[in-house]
Image (tube, rainbow, N blue to C red):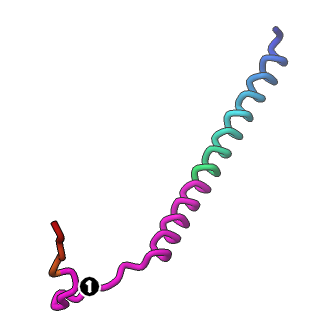
Amino acid sequence: MDIASMSTAMSNMQTQATHATKINSMVKDQIETTGQQAVQLIQSAAPVPTVDPTSPVGQNIDIRV
């Protein structure tokens, strides 16, 4: 293999590696954004009701044996 073709091959490999790194970064950013959106959706879908500690609700349990 001559020097010119080896140089071209190495340049192509470097370009592919750079491209793969950039794509991986973009995919990671997209996954993080999707995860944040999923958390926001979960939090907005089921709001936690406020509990009144002085309320008698839930203090007694009826059990029939």
Q: Residue at x 84, y 17 (%)?
A: 5
Return the residue nearer the eye: 23 or 47: 47
Q: Residue at x 57, y 61 (%)?
A: 33
Left or right side of 42 for 50: left
Q: Residue at x 16, y 91 (%)?
A: 54
Return the residue nearer the eye: 37 or 20: 37
The image shows residue 51, relative to residue 16, as above or below, that is below
Mark 1: which amino acid? Val
Q: Which residues are magenta?
A: 29-58
10 Å crowding of disc 1: few (<14), some (14-19), many (20+):
few
The image shows residue 29, relative to residue 16, as above or below, that is below
The image shows residue 31, relative to residue 37, as above or below, that is above
Name the image quarter holding residue 37.
bottom right
Name the image quarter holding residue 18.
top right
According to the picture, the residue beneath numbered tag 1 turns out to be 51
Return the residue nearer the eye: 24 or 12: 24
> Residue 46: x, y in percent?
44, 75
> Residue 61: x, y in percent?
17, 76
Quadrant containing the C terminus is bottom left
